[in-house]
């Protein structure tokens, strides 16, 4: 379960960083940038608290 949460968190983090570079290079419009940033922020803050600062437990 934690692996899935970490993967979704990574996608959210990438969606908050990559669009800025795409706007800077002229690949996407500012309005689409804002949409991607919003989705990334929701994904990151919706999933990261469930796995950060928790010790990994061995699966039994």
Image: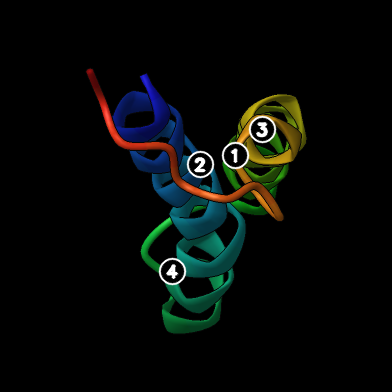
Task: Assess whether mark 2 and mark 4 are in contact (beta carbons under 8 angstroms).
Answer: no
Tell me the crowding category of disc 4: few under 14, some 14 to 19, or many 20 or more residues within 10 angstroms, Cα based.
some
- Quadrant assignment, res 27: bottom left
Give the mark nearer the N terminus: 1 vs 2: 2
In x, y percent, where is residue 26?
Answer: 44, 72
Q: CA distance from mark 4 to mark 2?
A: 20 Å
Q: Is residue 5 left or right of residue 36?
A: left
Q: Tag 4's secondary structure?
A: helix
Q: Is residue 11 left or right of residue 36?
A: left
Q: Label for residue 9? A: 2
In x, y percent, where is residue 13?
Answer: 54, 55
Residue drawn at x 42%, y 41% as measured from the top left:
6
What residue does disc 1 label?
A: 51
What residue does disc 4 label?
A: 22
Q: Tag 1's secondary structure?
A: loop
Q: CA distance from mark 4 to mark 1?
A: 29 Å
Residue drawn at x 45%, y 66% as measured from the top left:
18
Task: Assess whether mark 2 and mark 1 are in contact (beta carbons under 8 angstroms).
Answer: yes
Q: CA distance from mark 1 to mark 3?
A: 25 Å
Q: Please, is residue 25 above or below residue 40 in the view? A: below
Tell me the crowding category of disc 2: few under 14, some 14 to 19, or many 20 or more residues within 10 angstroms, Cα based.
many
Give the mark nearer the N terminus: 1 vs 3: 3
Tell me the crowding category of disc 3: few under 14, some 14 to 19, or many 20 or more residues within 10 angstroms, Cα based.
some
What residue does disc 3 label?
A: 35
Q: Is residue 46 left or right of residue 22?
A: right
């Amino acid at each position: 379960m934690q692996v899935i949460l970490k993967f979704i968190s990574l996608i959210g983090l990438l969606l908050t960083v990559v669009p800025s570079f795409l706007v800077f290079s002229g690949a996407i419009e500012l309005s689409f940038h804002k949409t991607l940033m919003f989705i990334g922020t929701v994904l990151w803050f919706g999933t990261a608290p469930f796995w950060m600062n928790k010790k990994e437990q061995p699966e039994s």
